[in-house]
Amino acid sequence: MEALGIDTVLAGARSRALGAANQAGAGAAQTARQQAEEFEAIFLNTMFQTMFAGLEESAGTWGGGAGSDAWRGMLVEQYADTIARSGGIGIADSVHRELLALQETSTR
């Protein structure tokens, strides 16, 4: 799994936010919230991938077999998605506010 750079993720979120500015009211706010949670999930995934990279693969949760890297990647992705969708660590809230601010300034 290739990790996305934070600049790439931010640029994508910004372009989607500007596109969402054309939507009306609550739909745009909901889209912005989903994008903010997606950003937080990607951030958490990157952090967890780094955190789990140093674990030994001979035993334990990952098993150490040929497919352990694939299973680890999927498990870490699910951890990140679940945490982000369950309120996260606060990144999505900040990104959501910024996306809404971008939408407001682009419609003026």
Image (cartoon, helix red, strand yellow):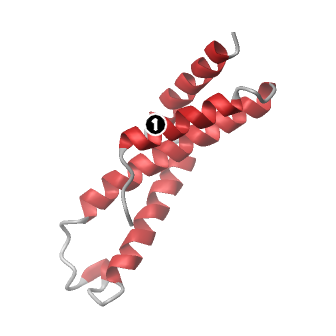
Q: Quadrant of the N terminus?
A: bottom left
Residue at x 55%, y 43% (from the top left corner)? 37
Which residue is found at the position 39% from the left and 78% from the top? 70
Left or right of 29 in this view: 60? left
Q: Secondary structure at mark 1?
A: helix
- The residue at which mark 1 appears reads as 10
The correct choice, above or below, for 10 with respect to 41 in the image is above
The spot of residue 67 in percent (x, y) is 36, 86
- Quarter of the rendering containing residue 50: bottom left
Q: Is residue 105 above or below residue 29?
A: above
- Which quadrant is home to the C terminus? top right
Against 23, residue 46 (above or below) is: below
Q: In the image, 62: left or right of 75?
A: left
For the residue pair 3 and 51, the one nearer the viewer reads as 3
Residue 94 percent location from the top left of the image: 48, 27
Point out residue 88 in the picture as x, y percentages from the top left corner. 48, 43
Point 32% across, 51% down: residue: 47
User: Residue at coordinates 45% horizontally, 55% vertically from top-left?
Assistant: 80
Specify the amino acid type for callout 1: Leu
Check the image and name the residue furthest to the right: 24
